[in-house]
Amino acid sequence: MVGGGVRKPLDYEELNENVKKVQYAVRGELYLRASELQKEGKKIIFTNVGNPHALGQKPLTFPRQVVALCQAPFLLDDPNVGLIFPADAIARAKHYLSLAPGGLGAYSDSRGIPGVRKEVAEFIQRRDGYPSDPELIYLTDGASKGVMQMLNAIIRSDRDGILVPVPQYPLYSAAISLFGGSLVPYYLEEEANWGLDFANIRQTVTEARSKGITVRAMVIINPGNPTGQCLSEGTIRELLSFCYRENLVLLADEVYQQNIYQDERPFISARKVLFDMGPPTSREVQLVSFHTVSKGYWGECGQRGGYFEMTNLPPKTVDEIYKVASIALSPNVPGQIFMGLMVNPPKPGDISYMKYAAESKAILESLRRRAHIMTDGFNNCRNVVCNFTEGAMYSFPQIRLPQRAIDAAQSAGKAADVFYCLKLLEATGISTVPGSGFGQKEGVFHLRTTILPAEEDMPAIMSSFKKFNDSFMDQYDGYGGGGSSYSRM
Amino acid sequence: MAAPAVAVDNLNPKVLKCEYAVRGEVVMHAQRLQQQLQTQPGSLPFDEILYCNIGNPQSLGQQPITFFREVLALCDHPCLLEREETKSLFSADAISRATNILASIPGRATGAYSHSQGIKGLRDAIASGITARDGFPANADDIFLTDGASPGVHMMMQLLIRNEKDGIFCPIPQYPLYSASIALHGGALVPYYLDESTGWGLEVSDLKKQLEDARSKGIDVRALVVINPGNPTGQVLAEENQRDIVKFCKNEGLVLLADEVYQENIYVDNKKFNSFKKIARSMGYNEEDLTLVSFQSVSKGYYGECGKRGGYMEITGFSAPVREQIYKVASVNLCSNITGQILASLVMNAPKVGDASYASYKAEKDGILQSLARRAKALEDAFNNLEGITCNKAEGAMYLFPQIRLPRKAIEAAKAAKKAPDAFYALRLLETTGIVVVPGSGFGQVPGTWHIRCTILPQEEKIPAIISHFKAFHESFMAKYRD
């Protein structure tokens, strides 16, 4: 259509369909409604996103001291700087400034500052016992950007399929929609502690292939989001064997590797297991591993610091990935310094070590306690069952909604869990994300909340939830008369 | 085992297709030579690599603005505000600005994900800054803070490009983010040529011709990219030209994508920066008349804070459903980095007359801008004095884009070496002098013409040596290849 200026290119109808298909519930309907209510003066507890500092967790002192000094290097010249900054923070700031010619204000290497990537490689080596190559580690503005880059490189058309766990963190489904690929879901088994059923997964892949989908990659989130499960070494081995047989690249989202709340299954990286398995698997399986400064006990979400490490990718592929990274010029430099500090924190003997260790320990131990408080609190509610949060930052209780509630939701034009979550929000100010935002089996409903509210607020929050839930269930469960039915596993 | 799951032959072809010369072949070669200088000193005919390929001022010694860094340091480590010693280390207005900024951040938590458009209080400050700049109101809800301006550009391309028949008008020469982004999103780049003989002017008659041409080929042209001041070309558009462009977009139903990241880099007295929003509003055009996206960044200007990745886009003339989609895409990445957000609010609300830091801030700013203007002139004159080279004035931005009339023998030598002639020249320049420039083919140019893009950013005291080394190289190159 020419001239006249009547049709506008950014009218809704004229938008890229892939954009319209994208869903990201974490900041979707519930969050927007909660924000509206907050503007009207209602007290809202935002548990929709893993954002620890927003719920009162304090930043660790040492990294903030170092980055402040890097930000304002003139402080280092002041004779009084030692009065308010410890000597090891001063030394570390000088170290990072020497690694970043031009300081925090210059674009770095598009892959990130080489010296920081070296620190990351050394961390990986210490963690796993296998050498890591800084040239294959790319720093990014948050892990999400790295995930986006990888999926964009892999997905050619809607006939390229990516295996994604259900439930999943909806960055994966959103990115696959944006890039026009196909999401091939594999269901985690709630009754088996959100375990993987490889027979089912193989079946899923076979079905996808029969529909003409080329399954290219498999996403694993370990510890899980929203589900929190920590994979055993045996499961990771099975995963890698599966990827080897089916020729899939494994995308290992390991951003919660520091958030472990049980001792039976400590974190073990996919890369370590891969190398433990030895050749041919260890040489053939392609793996990309993601990490971040946003989670763990650092919780520095606002810095947007992350990295991905590539294993067994051909050099030409790496070149293409470098090329795409170079268009964005460089990841933000303060975020890179946070990453360097996270993988290379104060050590015993350093001036700041005691404080750093105490701050870290306090956060992790509190998270572990809150994981229990929340799981137990949910399990104490009518028609709610909740797997224990073994890791990560979330609780994902199953809400067994009575049929009458499901019907009421339908009349209101809402998915049943959205309906429940909106009512929860309006009654208690607790802003959660409905399970449909993450995926769940048909007819089974959940919500995701975080374990991040302050520990002292937890009992009140759980009792407020229980009050709402139990009265909701009273309302929709029906007293006597024609057996009510529930959503079921 | 079958062929690897992910290899070049099964990568997304759009990734394979896109290119970005600013950090491309010549630069990678420079990095290898730099390694060589370290491991084998004296093995090359020069002592250092001089990176003139990228608008990265602080990597070449430009100092950050003190006031901005004071505020950022205090926001990074708010505990400092509770210490007595802080008053002697930081200026009073930096302390009060940081205090205000922290008060506008929920929980003073600079480590938390913010609202996906950016912290509201910072957007309010930016909107005020835009209003003060233009004399027309700006709305905080129209602002999306991004990790640098580039992610905003990508977002718009994603929104606009549905398939290979969707076209985006781009200036030639252009900053190759645009060509790369269009390729990545699978669209068609529709070129409009800037006229080198008229100081890189933009003729609406040419736009109309290119538009008809594209439409006749079945391309649905959706948007027009204008870079003002220009990159790599450095021209500052005349107001009348801007009005013609606005009218053209309105009449043809095109989204105007206004890259204004060099708005504070103007080196001539007879031109000034006018935002496209200001021009449109002063023509009486409101949101119903024009869909406009204006991009700004903290990477350029006199602040040059590239490494912070701060920037924003201001979107006007969009319907509510579309704004929701833009918000939705922004929300998938949660938010841009907080330091960058704070810096964007400082850039758009710099110290004013009467503020404690004003005098020193102004001295720093003027020092940088005046030095940039001197360097632009010195390099422009130097290029124009060389045989076969003509160079338009850099009225703004950070680059010179001289045209080099390469002799036939040089072009043949390039062909034999399987290089584009301007890449061949740039590589020879690098290997002889250590100076890194970007071949004009990375930006686009009229076929058969050759250019290089050279920044004006090396330290002022290095400029004479750069000029003399360049001259010596060029003279020997021409002596070798002259017809």
Image (spheres, coloured by chain):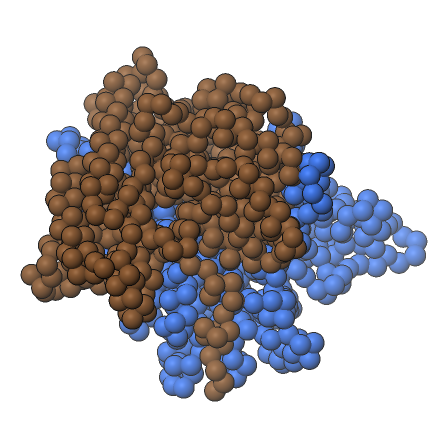
Chain colours: A blue, B brown
Rendered-image quadrant of the C terminus of chain B: bottom left
User: Which residue is pictured at 65% across the width and 42% down the height?
Assistant: A10
Taking the image as shown, residue B104 lies to the left or right of residue B221, namely left
Q: Is residue A101 above or below residue A127?
A: above
Q: Is residue B186 above or below residue B119?
A: below
Query: Would you say residue A22 is visible in this rendering?
Result: no
Residue B407 falls left or right of residue A411: left
| A238 to the left or right of A317 | right
Q: In terms of image quadrants, where is residue A425? A: top right
Q: What percent of the width, then of the height, locates residue B312?
A: 47, 37
Image x and y of residue B283, in percent: 58, 22
For this rendering, which residue is in front, A280 or B376? B376
Viewer-closest of B434 and A464: B434
Q: Is residue A8 left or right of residue A278?
A: right
Residue B367: horizontal and vertical position, in percent? Answer: 22, 27
The vertical placement of A185 against A239, above or below, is above
Residue A32 sits in which quadrant?
A: top right
Q: Residue B31 at x, y = what percent? A: 23, 59
**Residue B173 visible to an observer of this rendering:** yes
Residue at left 55%, top 38%? B205
Q: Residue furthest front?
A: B483
Residue located 34% across and 17% down the image: B352
Residue B325 picture quarter = top right
Residue at image position (55%, 31%) is B244
